[in-house]
Image (cartoon, rainbow, N blue to C red):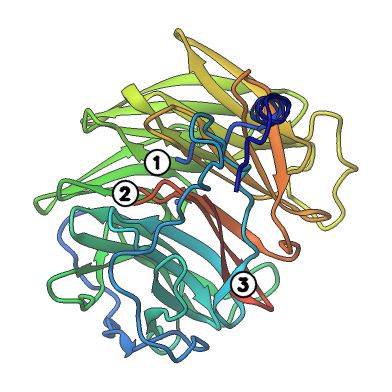
Amino acid sequence: MRSARSIAGVFILVSLLSACAAATVPSSTIAPSPSGAAAASDPHSAAPTRSSRPRASASVEAPSPTPSVTPLPTPEAPLIAVREPADWSKPVTIADGECWSVAVTIDDRGRYHIAARCDEEIHYLRWYPDAVDTHGDVFPPPSDRVELGPQLALDGAELLMAYSRLAQEDGGCGDDGLRDLGVYVRTRSDETDTWSKPYRVGEVGDSLQSFRAVDGVLHLTVQTPDGAVLYESLRDGATTRVPIPHAKTTSLRVGDDGHARVAYSTGHEIRLARVDGRSIDSTLIASSDETNLSSPAMVLGPGDLPVIVWTQNVDGGGGCAGPEPGPLDGTYLATEIHGTWQSERISKSTGSTSVTLDPATGRWHAIIDEPMLGLRYITTKGDGSLSRETLPDSRGFNGAVIRIDPEDGRLAVVAASYDDGIVVATKP
């Protein structure tokens, strides 16, 4: 309890509180590709094997659908608002197994929907912050089939999962023995609480790069067997396929205006395309003759303004023994300010990167896999400089995805490990 025994004591207390308020650091504002009717050239379309929880979940009752919210610290002085700096939690394991290729989306009720490939199968998990129990489904692939790269999209109350299906063949020198069969989609609604059987979208032989669903329209970017990359949409059973010239890797988002945006790499360029019907209008974001630009990831902010991150390195990935890292290697981020693109290197690491954005403030948040350090969180401060923080106990995880929980505004990072399964870390 505070006690004002003398005028001097009051003076000292007020001075200490003023100094504490001035030294307090402001808390952060919290804020992952379809053709004709689904003709099944592949006869295998197995329904999912249901499981009440993932392979190694705790045996306690599921929490209430409304997740608990971490309250802000209560200031001691009634006239001075003091918030302690928020820290990342330690990673919590929510599923065991050898896992990789994580996809995450969070609905407006604070439910985390997670898909990943674990132990040669696609797993779906539904998890709540601060919960112990996790519910999910496991989708064993049909015989002699491999299913890879699951991605999730929320469209109202419907959750959709898209992934690539491949056939296992003999293979040989330089051939992994896998042949693309196409992109498959499953849907799940809150009303039925069950997944549909998978159906193919697009052409036979496509492989999935990016996936979104908005107002009943599926938006995808896919790679064809001859290496071409296309934007594809499926609306009311009609499919539109639009080539993206020279594209290699892509990231897809749909703007508030209903038009898809695709950030893509051509090898030595990062470009941004806006799709309008059957045409594409692209803009150069960054280029280099000295390094390879790859793996773009994009998020759209207010007014459909994009934030794009990508990797640059001198190694084109064409051999076992690549060159030494170059002086321009790293992870770069670009934003559009008053019609002009501005980019900067935010890390010297070339590990996998994910980015999200607070729609209320326009502030971006990125997570980068820095193998020697762990998962590195990077964002901007109020003065525009960068803030960097390594998540505790995060070495050895891969494919981390960062998202903002719309229910309470917390940041969440979901990552995978070949040894520790799927983990979640959060930051209020």
Question: Between marks 2 and 3, how big is the CA–CA gap?
Answer: 29 Å
According to the picture, the residue beneath numbered tag 2 turns out to be: 212
Q: Earlier in the sequence, mark 1 or mark 3?
A: 3
- Which is more foreground, mark 1 or mark 3? 1
Residue 215 at x, y percent in the picture: 16, 46
Residue 112 at x, y percent in the picture: 39, 63
Residue 184 at x, y percent in the picture: 31, 66
Q: Tell me the element at label 2.
A: strand
- 115 or 70, which lies in front? 70
Please state which amino acid type lies under the numbered disc 1: Leu
- 225 or 218, which lies in front? 218
Asked whether, in this view, residue 377 is left or right of residue 45, the answer is right
Check contact, mark 1 vs mark 2: CB within 8 A.
yes
Residue 53 appears in the figure: yes
**Disc number for residue 252:** 1
Quarter of the view holding residue 374: bottom right
Residue in view at x 43 percent, y 44 percent: 229
Quarter of the view holding residue 187: bottom left
Q: Earlier in the sequence, mark 2 or mark 3?
A: 3
Residue in view at x 62 percent, y 27 percent: 381
**Disc number for residue 176:** 3
Q: Is residue 324 above or below residue 155?
A: above
- 55 or 258, which lies in front? 55
- Around disc 2, counting alpha carbons within 10 Å, would you say few (fewer than 14), some (14 to 19), or many (20 or more)? many
- Which is more foreground, mark 2 or mark 3? 2
